[in-house]
Amino acid sequence: MASKAKHSEFIKSAAQKLGFLSCGISKAEFLEEEAPRLEQWLKEGKHGKMAYMENHFDKRLDPRLLVPGAQSVVSLLLNYYTDVPQAEGAPKISKYAYGTDYHWVIKDKLKQLFQSLQEEIGEVNGRVFVDSAPVMDKAWAQRSGLGWMGKNTNLITQKVGSFFFIAELIVDLELEYDTPVTDHCGTCTACIDACPTEALTPYTIDASKCISYLTIELKDQIPNEFQNKMDHWAFGCDVCQEVCPWNRFSKPHSEPLFDPKPEFINLTQKDWEELTEATFDTIFENSAVKRTRYQGLKRNLSFLKR
């Protein structure tokens, strides 16, 4: 028992030194409560054209199928909140994409954490995950006591908010497990009321209506029904987070790699309209915005002008 507590304490301390906002641990087991919810959500087609969401159903719900012998899921949060504004009137980009692509930043930190763990304990088998496999990040973070699933389907933490990334380290090591926290959304429906495309109902999102899906995941043309409903978002959307009362506690991140490039933050409406592929490649070289590719971003910008 002492070693479980000691190892858990070591992981949390090492995570803090690497700049993670918080760290929680839960037992690697089948996500029984999530299974019927996920099945129903897929059955109703709320994943839109993200066909990959239908794949690996069992792996999504059981981390032991991803990491043989897995005993613990270490969930980690990394703050990305910024109060740096874009140029006035410019098409809006979600805050998480302001700086260097978070996949690279977090994966590097996770590898360092895993290496520290192996140096401290010896042979530990496991894998690091940052949106890289069918792992239900929010469900594991909730189980690990890092927050509750809000009505906007984001993980929310008291006195912190929700502007953070979630990542995991799944290991074959038995650790001390944290307990979930209670829901603090209460009667608030700010996120549901503010969603420009009415994609939200309490604790459920119809991804096929979500601006983030429409501007990033959808490869076809954006359906006409969303004309004049995009709220000037060209990549992603932060509306349901911006209106959440808990995000009044958000503090700017301390990760230099998440700082926006001046040439991005200063892009005016005119600059966006005249954006060339060469400029796109330069400004968004290491950015998550590259996910849409140049043509995808131009499609989004054109749709906003219609």
Image (spheres, grey):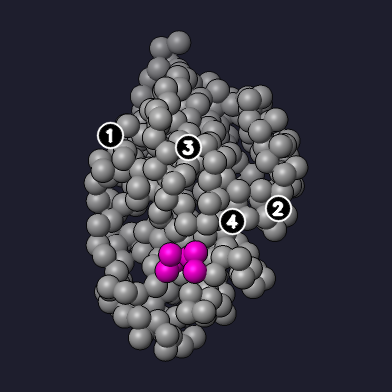
- Is disc 1 surrounded by few (<14), some (14 to 19) or many (20+) residues within 10 Å? few
Q: Position of residue 90 (x, y in %)?
A: 34, 74
User: Would residue 228 be seen by someone viewing this image from the given angle?
Assistant: yes
Disc 4 versus disc 2: distance between alpha carbons? 18 Å
169 up-or-down from 131: above or below? above
Regarding mark 1 in the picture, which secondary structure is present there? Answer: loop
Which span of residues is magenta-colored?
228-233
Residue identifier under label 4: 209
Q: Is residue 230 magenta?
A: yes
Q: Earlier in the sequence, mark 4 or mark 2?
A: 2
Image coords of residue 271 (percent x, y)? 36, 85
Q: Which residue is mark 2?
A: 52
- The answer, for residue 164, to whether it is visible in the render is no
Q: Earlier in the sequence, mark 3 or mark 2?
A: 2
**Which of the 4 image quarters holds residue 210?**
bottom right
Question: Where is mark 1, residue-wise?
Answer: 159
Question: Marks 1/2: CA distance?
Answer: 34 Å
Q: Residue at x 41, y 23 (%)?
A: 181
- Residue at position x 39%, y 67% in the image: 92
